[in-house]
Image (spheres, rainbow, N blue to C red):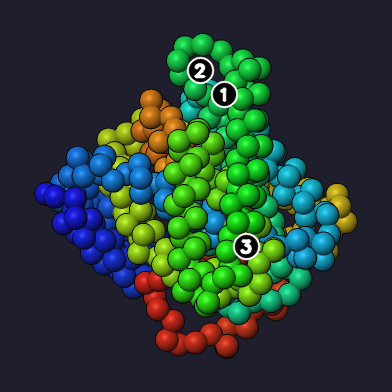
C-alpha cells in the first residue's frame, strides 16, 4: 500500500471510530485510538507496520508542535496577574509532587527501570487542557473557578514539558548502560534555555510579520509556516520542539493583536491532522505487551490519582484559596488526553529503546482517564454554578476534536 492511500484509509477509519465513540457517549479520542489498534498491524492488519513507521516520526513532530502552539495560546500575562501568583505556586508544587510520587511508585512498586519510570512520571504531571478547554466551551462556563482551572492546567502542562526534557536527558545515559552526569543535565538545561530563546525570537518575528498580513488567512499561513520552520530548526540543532513552539505561542498570544480568532483557525486546521495522529498512536499499541505492563498501568493510575488529589488540595489549602477551589480543583486536573498523547509520542521517538513500555502504559492510562475524568470536570462546573449549558448550540459538530477530545 502506498503512503497516500494509507493515510487516506487511516483518516477514514479514525473518523468513523470517533463517530462511533461519540454515539456511545465516549470521547472521540478514545474512538481514534481504539480503531487504530483494531485496524493496525497488531490487529486486523489493514494498516501496515511499514506505513506506520514511515509517517510516525514526522507526524509526531508536526502534531505535537501544533498542540504546543495552541497550549501557549492559553497563557496570558494579564490572566496570571489577575488570578495571582498563588496559582503559579499550586501548579509548580503539584507538578513536582506528582512527578516524585509516580516515579517512586513505578520504580519501587512496579519494578520499572529508572529510564522507563522517569519519563512516565513526567508524563503523569500533564492535566490535558485538551479535555478541560472543550468542556468549558461546551458548558459556556465562566467565573473565577473556571479561570483558575484553565490557568493551572496550562501552567502544569508547561512544567510537564520541562520535566520531560530533563527526564529524557537522564534516561539516555541509563539506557546506554552508564550513569547520568552533571554535564548531561547541564546540556539539557542549556537546550531548554536555547529553546525558549529560539521560540521567543520566532514569536516576535511572527508579531512583526502580522503587521503586513492583510487578514486572517495570511496570518494563518504565517503561523503554520513558522510552526514547521521552528520544528525543523529544533530537529536539526537538537533543541526541544515542544518548548520552542510553546514559547512562540505564548509570545504571539500576548504581544500580537486580535489573536483569538487566529488561534481558533489554527485549531480548525489541526483537527484532521490530529485525527490522523491519534489513530496512528492507537495503531502503535501492542496488545501483547499489556499483560506484562499491567502492574505498571495500575500503579501509574493509582499513584497519579492520589498525588493529584492530595497535591492540589494541600497547596490550595496552604495558600488560603477559596473553599470551592480546594474541594473541586483537584478532581478537574485528572484528565489526560490529546496533549498527553502528543507528549508520549515525542518521548517514544526520543527514547526508542523503551518506547514500547512507555506507549503501552500511557495509551492504557489515557483511555482510562478519558472515560473517568471528564464527568468530574463537568460536575464541578455545574455544581459551582459557572456552567450555562442552556446557551449551548444544538448544531455543534460532534466529531470535531476540539469539541470532543
Residue picked out by circle 3: 208
The local secondary structure at tag 2 comes to helix
Circle nearer the N terminus (3, 2)? 2
The local secondary structure at tag 3 comes to helix
Find the distance from the CA under tag 3 to the CA under tag 2: 44 Å
What x and y, as percent, mark residue 356?
Answer: 36, 33
Does residue 386 appear to the left or right of 85 in the view shown?
left
The residue under the point 57% across, 35% down is 165
Which residue is most to the left?
1
Q: How many marks?
A: 3
The residue under the point 36% across, 59% down is 273
Residue picked out by circle 2: 174
Mark 1, Cα crowd under 10 Å, few <14 / some 14-19 / many 20+, is many
Q: Nearer the viewer, residue 151 or 378?
A: 151
**Contact, CB < 8 Å: mark 2 with mark 1?**
yes
Mark 2, Cα crowd under 10 Å, few <14 / some 14-19 / many 20+, is some
Position of residue 302 relative to residue 332, above or below, is: above
Position of residue 297 relative to residue 17, above or below, is: above
Residue 365 visible to the viewer: no
Does residue 274 appear to the left or right of 233 in the view shown?
left
What x and y, as percent, mark residue 370?
Answer: 47, 57
Tag shown at residue 196: none
Position of residue 26 relative to residue 395, above or below, is: above
The local secondary structure at tag 1 comes to helix
Residue 256 visible to the viewer: yes
Circle nearer the N terminus (3, 1)? 1
What x and y, as percent, mark residue 149?
Answer: 68, 62
**Contact, CB < 8 Å: mark 3 with mark 2?**
no
Q: Looking at the rendering, which quadrant does residue 357 occupy?
A: top left
Residue picked out by circle 1: 170
Which residue is most to the front?
212
Amino acid at each position: 500500500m502506498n503512503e497516500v492511500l494509507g493515510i487516506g484509509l487511516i483518516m477514514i477509519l479514525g473518523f468513523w471510530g470517533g463517530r462511533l465513540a461519540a454515539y456511545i457517549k465516549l470521547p472521540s479520542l478514545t474512538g481514534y485510538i481504539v480503531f487504530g489498534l483494531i485496524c493496525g498491524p497488531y490487529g486486523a492488519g489493514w494498516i501496515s507496520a511499514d506505513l506506520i513507521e514511515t509517517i510516525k516520526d514526522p507526524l509526531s513532530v508536526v502534531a505535537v508542535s501544533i498542540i504546543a502552539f495552541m497550549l501557549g495560546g492559553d497563557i496570558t500575562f494579564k490572566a496570571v496577574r489577575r488570578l495571582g501568583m498563588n496559582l503559579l505556586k499550586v501548579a509548580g508544587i503539584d507538578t513536582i509532587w506528582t512527578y516524585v510520587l509516580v516515579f517512586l511508585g513505578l520504580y519501587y512498586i512496579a519494578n520499572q527501570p529508572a529510564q522507563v519510570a522517569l519519563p512516565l512520571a513526567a508524563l503523569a504531571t500533564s492535566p490535558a487542557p485538551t479535555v478541560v478547554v472543550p468542556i468549558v466551551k461546551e458548558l459556556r462556563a465562566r467565573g473565577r473557578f473556571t479561570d483558575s482551572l484553565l490557568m493551572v492546567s496550562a501552567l502544569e502542562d508547561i512544567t510537564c514539558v520541562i520535566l520531560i526534557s530533563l527526564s529524557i536527558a537522564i534516561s539516555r545515559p541509563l539506557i546506554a548502560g552508564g550513569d547520568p552526569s552533571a554535564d548531561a543535565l547541564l546540556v539539557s538545561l542549556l537546550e531548554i534555555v536555547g529553546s525558549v530563546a529560539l521560540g521567543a525570537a520566532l514569536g516576535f518575528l511572527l508579531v512583526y510579520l502580522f503587521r503586513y498580513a492583510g487578514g486572517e488567512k495570511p496570518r494563518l499561513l504565517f503561523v503554520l509556516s513558522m510552526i514547521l520552520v521552528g520544528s525543523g530548526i529544533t530537529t536539526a540543532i537538537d533543541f526541544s520542539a515542544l518548548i520552542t513552539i510553546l514559547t512562540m505561542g505564548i509570545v504571539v498570544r500576548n504581544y500580537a493583536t486580535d489573536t483569538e480568532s487566529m488561534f481558533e483557525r489554527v485549531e480548525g486546521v489541526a483537527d484532521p491532522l490530529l485525527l490522523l495522529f491519534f489513530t496512528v498512536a492507537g495503531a502503535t499499541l501492542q496488545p501483547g505487551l499489556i499483560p506484562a505492563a499491567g502492574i505498571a498501568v495500575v500503579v501509574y493510575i493509582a499513584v497519579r490519582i492520589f498525588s493529584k488529589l492530595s497535591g492540589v488540595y494541600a497547596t490550595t489549602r496552604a495558600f488560603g484559596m477559596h473553599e470551592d477551589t480546594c474541594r473541586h480543583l483537584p478532581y478537574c486536573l485528572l484528565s489526560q488526553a490529546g496533549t498527553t498523547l502528543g507528549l508520549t509520542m515525542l518521548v517514544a521517538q526520543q527514547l526508542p529503546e523503551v518506547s514500547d513500555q512507555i506507549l503501552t502504559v500511557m495509551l492504557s492510562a489515557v483511555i482510562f482517564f478519558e472515560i473517568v475524568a471528564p464527568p468530574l470536570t463537568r460536575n464541578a462546573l455545574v455544581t459551582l454554578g459557572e456552567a450555562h449549558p442552556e446557551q449551548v448550540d444544538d448544531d455543534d459538530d460532534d466529531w470535531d476534536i476540539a469539541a470532543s477530545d
